[in-house]
Image (cartoon, rainbow, N blue to C red):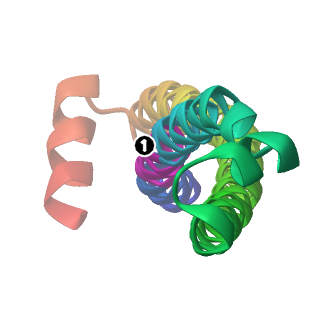
Amino acid sequence: NLRAEQASEAYNGAMWRLEQAKQAYRQARADAQHARRTVAAQRNRIGALVAQSYQNGGDLSALNAMMSADGPQGVMDQYVAFQGASTSLQADYKRFAAADALAQVFEGKARHAKAEQVRLAAKAARARDAAVASADAAQAEATDIAAEKETLITQLAAAQNISVDLARKRQAALE
């Protein structure tokens, strides 16, 4: 009975650890999904900036700048605007790369949490099987002991030349 109880407690502990692993997996998966949404948003923003830069880039040719009414000051203004857009694009790309790296970390964490969950589920199943086997063994042993006790009471009654019922009552009183 003690072994069966210990096995049952081991199973309960394994189930608790499994639930913790499931919760860690759910959190890691949610973190990874959030990071992937951030990456997608960054990718869309970069795409929009590249498209805008491409569409506006044709206005910065040397010939167009010299021929425009703004003259050299207009060329400088356009150059400053182009540099600002380029710097903004680089900053956005760095944010995108960081978000992508973070998403990869979270996805790795989710894979690890899933593997841990699978490992703990198998361990919980083994603990459950051990608990059931221990309980079955304890029950079988109790049945064997009860049968042996009944045999001994019958032999005692025969040896004392008394009824089996009386021998049972004496044994119960002694116990």
Q: Classify mark 1: helix, strand or loop.
A: helix
Q: Is residue 141 above or below residue 101?
A: above
Q: In this view, does 30 lie to the left or right of 112?
A: left
Image location (x, y in percent) of residue 13:
47, 60
Q: Residue at 47% across / 51% down in the picture?
A: 31
Q: Is residue 175 left or right of residue 128?
A: left
Q: Which of 119 and 69 is in front in this view?
A: 69
The image shows residue 15 at horizontal and vertical percentages of 46, 46
In depth, the one of 44 and 127 nearer the eye is 44
Looking at the picture, how far across and down is residue 44, in whole percent?
53, 31
The residue where tag 1 is placed is 30
Asked if the stretch drawn in magenta spans residue 44, the answer is no
Q: Give the range drawn in magenta.
A: 21-34
**Callout count:** 1
Confirm whether the magenta stretch covers residue 22.
yes
Residue drawn at 43 percent across, 28 percent down: 150
Q: Quadrant of the C terminus?
A: bottom left
